[in-house]
Image (tube, rainbow, N blue to C red):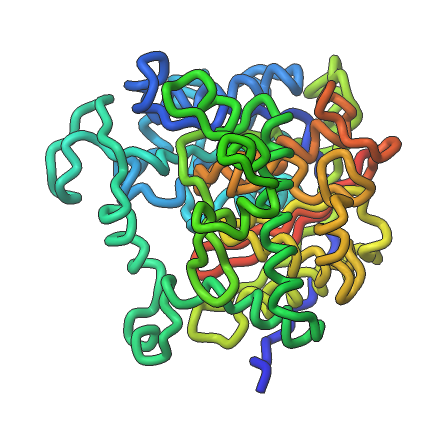
Amino acid sequence: MDQIVNKTKLHPYSRSVSIIGVGCTPFMYTVDSPETNGLTEGEMFGYAALKAMEDAGVNPQNIDYYFHGEASPLNGSNYLVPNIQIGNWFGMKGKGSIHHSEACCTGYLAIEQAVNAIASGKYDCVLTACVEFGDSTPSPADNVESRKHPYKRDKMTMEKFLKTTQWLYDRTYTRALMAGQEMIYDDAAEWYVRTRKITADQMNDALNWMGITARRNAASTPLSLLNWSKTTDNPIKTYDELAEEQGMTVEEYMNSPFNPRMGDFLRAAGVELKCDGAAACIVCATDMIPQIAPNLKHAPIEVLGIGSSALEATNPHFEVRATEEAVRQVYELTGKSGDDLDLFYANDFIITSQLISAEIAGYLPFGEGWKYIVDGRTAWDGDKPLNSNGGRTAFGHAHAASGLADVYEACKQLWGEMGDHQVKIKDPKTAMLRGYGGAQNVAAIILEKKA
């Protein structure tokens, strides 16, 4: 029986709130390059923050408060209160701030917290940014009590990573119900196959083409991990390139042992590439923009509404149910539907998130989304772009920063500022971002470019 989820009714914001500037670092493996090895949290966060200020045409004196997001300070940070330690890197000495952590949903809820602060009337302009070292830990990193070097970092091993992911789950029940992290990757795929009545082979094709398209999308996105890796000795390649090296077609490669199954459905191509990065937004009261950012070079992007839901992993089909509730909330508030969306982004550290959330939101038609994917229509240059930046499996997954990296991409696309990577949709105006993470928070954010 499907889980019954409590319903929440959203109310309109007290005043209009808009994003006026965005910034993002390249997503990268910082310790793998002498040019980036030794970067600190302050430098990463500060770079994204200053880029966002530059984009908005504001300076730190215009900003009333800042939000600091980091998904796993246990792994990545040198600090218990990381927001306090880094303000001098971007000119915010003396400004109020707060740190928050919602695992992989941190970047999406960073927008919600910023919007709420403006809509309440308390502030007129705030900075919200996230930073993550998802591929490295402070050195030495034997345990949380170790004295850590101020800037040297060690590579994050999978063993270290998995030791802390268990902290995301209610350990009382997940073992007995077999719902811990290692057991849930195939749930969404199985649910889709059963409810859409497609075959396992059709789901396999959809999963493979999501992986192929993700890397093709990331290849055209300057800040992606895929493109950053080209500066190192171990570049990440598209699946087309890898297939050509093996003398295979890309379809043959994706069905070969080079892309092994990790369960009944999911293959290796459908799993995140964890990495390091930071991203930021400037959020402002829309009616205050002429005063705060008089030289703004692009139209404000209004945050129309944000639906939120949370279900931890013992709930059946928890990602599906939380997405349904978050989407329902924001559509009920805004009067929008999937037909109004020009762009769609889904946090997809497990790549099935693309397909199921796009259909739940009505961006792709019920039961037909997998066909759109296989036919190439969800590529960045297709008629239904889905994760135009490549998403978590190709742009990279700097856990907290990933949500704001999606906001960066969405805003730049809505502004028409992506150059050779600009989507082919004529004058896109509206985007939805479906955030997911935190064992498990879900957010559904609707952005709309103002005329």
Residue furthest to the bottom in view is: 1
Task: Give me the residue at 86% from left, 31% from top.
Answer: 427
Horizontal side of 86 relative to 326 (left or right) equals left
Q: Position of residue 257 (x, y in %)?
A: 43, 50
Horizontal side of 40 relative to 54 (left or right) equals left
Q: Position of residue 29 (x, y in %)?
A: 37, 28
Task: Give me the residue at 58% from left, 57% from top.
Answer: 352
Horizontal side of 175 relative to 51 (left or right) equals left
Quadrant in the picture for the C terminus: top right
Q: Is residue 174 above or below residue 10?
A: below
Q: Is residue 75 above or below residue 280?
A: below
Comparing 109 with 257, the one in front is 257
Total numbered labels = 0
Comparing 424 with 431, the one in front is 424
Comparing 272 with 60, the one in front is 272
**Viewer can see residue 284:** yes
Q: Position of residue 205 (x, y in %)?
A: 64, 56
Task: Give me the residue at 46% from left, 62% from top.
Answer: 185
